[in-house]
Amino acid sequence: GAVVSQHPSRVICKSGTSVKIECRSLDFQATTMFWYRQFPKQSLMLMATSNEGSKATYEQGVEKDKFLINHASLTLSTLTVTSAHPEDSSFYICSAIFSSGGWDTQYFGPGTRLTVL
Amino acid sequence: GDSVTQMEGPVTLSEEAFLTINCTYTATGYPSLFWYVQYPGEGLQLLLKATKADDKGSNKGFEATYRKETTSFHLEKGSVQVSDSAVYFCALRFSGGYNKLIFGAGTRLAVHP
């Protein structure tokens, strides 16, 4: 099946610094990727839709200036958490849309655990 | 708005027991329904899906039937294994929703030998 990777898998940073997380579709091209946030023992909350070559669409309540998304190519989307604070600590998961046979399937990356000290 | 409700976990079963994880949804249109599984330390994997009423999705011994009359998509397996221990998420995708998925809260399953 289609594979989506994320890098890094874990990151620890100091409060006030910025962190970049990469999401790559390894064996297919994805014009659309999604970024989710998952709190411990909770469900995934959609943060934004990343579209190749255009601005991301953010969900209500998500600060676009804090969570910068860049989808520069058909295989790469990046999420940058700017001026991170402890409350940004979470598990961030991306997904990419794989289109085949007229059906779109979301494939998920393994996630990135961010800890802000 | 559209939403998904799952039974609370954790669900603890012995190996070879029968599994049911309830899932109901609220949607204004005719969504597609999914079950995803998240193994410890990993991302979500699509387990099965159903795109219209009365469709049955199945995979790896798991089954779920799209019941429009009860707005449900319960996950079942006749005989669980220890390797099935994971968190299971029910989700819907609205037909006009640009592939957006709405997830339930997830149900943790623990299977003991």
Image (cartoon, coloured by chain):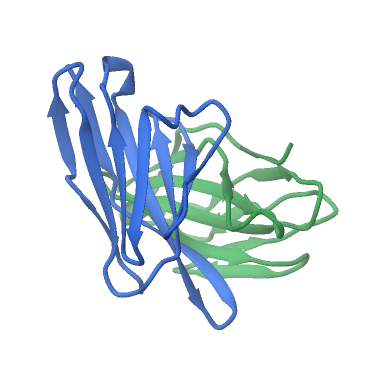
Q: Quadrant of the N terminus of chain A?
A: bottom left
* Tally of numbered discs: 0
Left/right of residue B49 with respect to residue A85 in the rendered view: right
Left/right of residue B106 with respect to residue B42 in the rendered view: right
Where in the figure is residue A54, as x and y percent of width and height?
A: 46, 54
Q: Residue furthest right?
A: B69
The residue under the point 48% across, 42% down is: A48
Answer yes or no: is residue B85 visible: no
Q: Which one is in front, A17 or A86?
A: A17
| B73 to A91, vertically: above or below | below
Left/right of residue B76 with respect to residue B113 in the rendered view: right
The residue under the point 55% across, 83% down is: A101
Q: Which residue lies furthest to the bottom in this view?
A: A101
| B102 to A51, vertically: above or below | above
Where in the figure is residue A59, as x and y percent of width and height?
A: 55, 36
Left/right of residue A61 with respect to residue B30 in the rendered view: left
Where in the figure is residue A8, as x and y percent of width and height?
A: 17, 45
Answer yes or no: is residue A36 visible: yes
| A42 to A28, vertically: above or below | above
Q: In which quarter of the image is residue B52?
A: bottom right
Hue of chain A?
Answer: blue
Q: Which one is in front, A75 or B52?
A: A75
Q: Which one is in front, B24 or B32?
A: B32
The residue under the point 31% across, 29% down is: A90
The residue under the point 28% across, 45% down is: B40
Hue of chain B?
Answer: green
Where in the figure is residue A116, as x and y percent of width and height?
A: 21, 21
Q: In which quarter of the image is the C terminus of chain A?
A: top left
| B85 to A114, vertically: above or below | below
Q: Which one is in front, B94 or B55?
A: B94
